[in-house]
Image (spheres, rainbow, N blue to C red):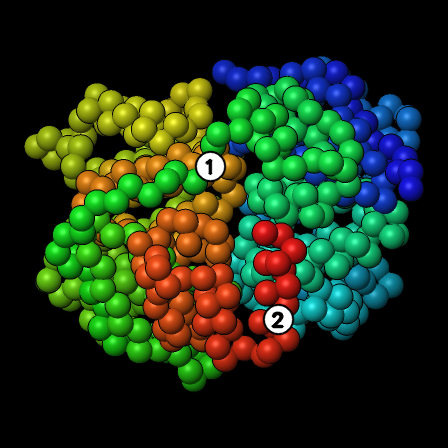
């Protein structure tokens, strides 16, 4: 089957102060097909997509749609040409309803006089049925989990009937079952002739869903071809120049004394039940404890409770044997707890501040002398962590919002490490991070553990949790449903434990997904 080129870029170059994001790039977007775009963080993927979506304009080069030269000077221009985009960083209004977000700036009206909210609710329900989700149109977006917000963002693009749809990390916050739903929707859109650009760091996922692939490295296209015959080594070779980057191998080291303990933790929810129900666990110094489970299992709520986010929670936390009596986050940080939140944009960074200011926000007292901030020491410390975490920046004084998503994530990790924690809580630490950056983050995790830091990390990635963890705890419906060592953990056992309390069909869907992508 032939797939005609619906959009192309020729000689595309985009220059920012201090960096060239795209260098003379030629890109073809084929209709009725999934066009995979892959590259490390900072490779230029998001820049290219922003150019197509009208958010940014090329410094030089030309864009053609159906062989006609076009000027996409704004997002409105792109929408008029049938281009829709789901950004990696969600662009939703948390204080507005799901229906209002989906139809923002395109409201359904009665005779052009007032908003037809009944019609908007009906169309929102239809979109949610298409995406196989039961999300109430009147629910405030701010009350939804990140994965549900991702579904709303996808529904917003589907509502625009785009003929070119860009999906930037669309599965980063979705469970395995939700990924299956998204893939079914993508197949439906392909049959309708929609050209899809698909950006993801999950390489197995790209091979499964893609029809064509384009690889970017440092703003240059290093490979572009049909997906037929493409394998992971080929992708990695074109991404980073060699095929050697992988999860770092385990370095065995002795564990120390117990550094963290949770006893009978309960977190009531608004429906009368518990988001976290009776969870108890312990962590030794130098140990990496993985917490695996499906969306809604209570994993995020548990680590947020440990950091003091929910004062109404019950239970006791201990750090180095001392009870964490204060419910305040700042006091938990002083005790030695630090967290990498799931949503870096909302909970981890202040977008208008510089990279330097973001990284030192939680450790200003450590960088002060006689009550005054030692700016020289601050800059040197930030520089050390930038090098250690291999964060790609032109200057630490640039706004953190100027970085790619993966580099922003590494800034959040640096901020946490600068507090010199005894226990590091990491909620989906590799979300939105490419294969090279993952290897660096995981290398740092192992190095920190070898130095005696206790690490609890939440993930929905089976390969990660099995490859990194010294011990694994599985949660489902707020409870601990399984505990495994390296010797007893298998994919089948983890999936079975994570599906406790869910329907059989749900568990089967997860298993089917793993069998197809692994």
- The residue at 35%/78% (across/down) is 277
Asked whether residue 246 appears in the rendered view, the answer is: yes
- Looking at the image, residue 230 sits to the left or right of residue 501; the answer is right
Q: In this view, does 233 lie above or below 379?
A: below
- Looking at the image, residue 305 sits to the left or right of residue 201; the answer is left
**Residue pointed to by mark 1:** 246
- The residue at 83%/31% (across/down) is 7
Q: Position of residue 189 (x, y in %)?
A: 82, 53
Q: In this view, does 385 lie above or below 137?
A: above
Q: Is residue 427 above or below residue 268?
A: above
Cα distance between the residues tagged 1 and 2: 29 Å
Q: Residue 464 carries which label?
A: none
Q: Hey, which quadrant is residue 458 in on the image?
A: bottom left
Q: Position of residue 4 (x, y in %)?
A: 90, 35
- The residue furthest bottom is 272
Position of the N terminus, as image quadrant, is top right
Q: Position of residue 311 (x, y in %)?
A: 28, 69
Label whose residue precedes the other's in the sequence (1 or 2): 1
Q: In this view, does 59 lie above or below 277?
A: above
Q: Nearer the viewer, residue 385 or 499?
A: 499
**Residue pointed to by mark 2:** 508
**SS at circle 1:** loop
- The residue at 15%/33% (across/down) is 368
Q: Which of 263 and 329 is in front in this view?
A: 263
């Amino acid at each position: 089957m032939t797939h005609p080129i619906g959009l192309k870029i020729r000689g595309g170059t985009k220059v920012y102060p201090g960096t060239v994001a795209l260098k003379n790039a030629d890109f073809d977007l084929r209709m009725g097909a999934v066009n995979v775009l892959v590259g490390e963080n900072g490779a230029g993927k998001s820049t290219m997509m922003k150019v197509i979506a009208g958010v940014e304009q090329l410094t030089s080069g030309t864009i053609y749609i159906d062989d006609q030269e076009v000027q996409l000077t704004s997002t409105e221009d792109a929408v008029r040409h049938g281009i829709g985009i789901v950004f990696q960083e969600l662009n939703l209004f948390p204080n507005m309803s799901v229906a209002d977000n989906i139809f923002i700036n395109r409201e359904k009206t009665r005779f052009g006089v007032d908003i037809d909210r009944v019609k908007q609710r009906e169309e929102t329900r239809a979109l949610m049925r298409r995406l196989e989700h039961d999300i109430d149109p009147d629910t405030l977006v701010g009350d939804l989990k990140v994965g549900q917000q991702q579904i709303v963002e996808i529904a917003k693009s589907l509502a625009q009937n785009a003929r070119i749809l860009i999906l930037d990390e669309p599965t980063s916050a979705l469970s395995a079952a939700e990924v299956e739903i998204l893939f079914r929707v993508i197949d439906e859109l392909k049959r309708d002739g929609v050209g899809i650009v698909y950006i993801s760091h999950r390489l197995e996922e790209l091979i499964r869903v893609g029809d064509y692939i384009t690889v970017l490295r440092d703003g240059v296209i290093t490979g572009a071809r049909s997906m037929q015959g493409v394998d992971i080594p080929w992708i990695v070779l074109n991404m980073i120049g060699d095929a050697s980057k992988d999860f770092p191998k385990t370095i065995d080291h002795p564990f120390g004394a117990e550094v963290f303990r949770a006893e009978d933790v309960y977190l009531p929810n608004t429906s009368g039940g518990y988001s976290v129900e009776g969870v108890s666990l312990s962590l030794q110094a130098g140990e990496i404890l993985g917490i695996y489970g499906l969306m809604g299992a209570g994993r995020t709520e548990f680590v947020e409770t440990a950091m003091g986010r929910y004062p109404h929670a019950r239970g006791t936390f201990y750090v180095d044997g001392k009870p964490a009596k204060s419910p305040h986050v700042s006091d938990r940080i002083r005790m030695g707890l630090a967290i990498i939140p799931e949503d870096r944009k909302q909970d981890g960074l202040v977008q208008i501040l510089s990279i330097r200011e973001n990284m030192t926000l939680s450790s200003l007292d450590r960088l002060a002398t006689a009550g005054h901030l030692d700016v020289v020491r601050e800059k040197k410390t930030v520089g050390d962590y930038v090098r250690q975490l291999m964060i790609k920046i032109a200057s630490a004084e640039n706004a953190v919002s100027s970085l790619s998503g993966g580099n922003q994530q590494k800034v959040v990790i640096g901020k946490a490490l600068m507090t010199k924690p005894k226990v590091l809580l990491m909620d989906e630490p590799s979300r939105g991070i490419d294969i090279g950056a993952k290897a660096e983050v995981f290398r740092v995790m192992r190095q920190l553990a070898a130095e005696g830091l206790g690490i609890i990390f939440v993930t929905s990635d089976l390969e990660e949790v099995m490859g990194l963890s010294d011990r694994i705890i599985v949660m489902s419906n707020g409870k601990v449903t399984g505990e495994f060592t390296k010797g007893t953990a298998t994919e089948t056992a983890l999936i079975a434990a994570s599906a406790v309390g869910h329907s059989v069909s749900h568990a089967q869907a997860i298993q089917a997904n793993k069998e197809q992508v692994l």
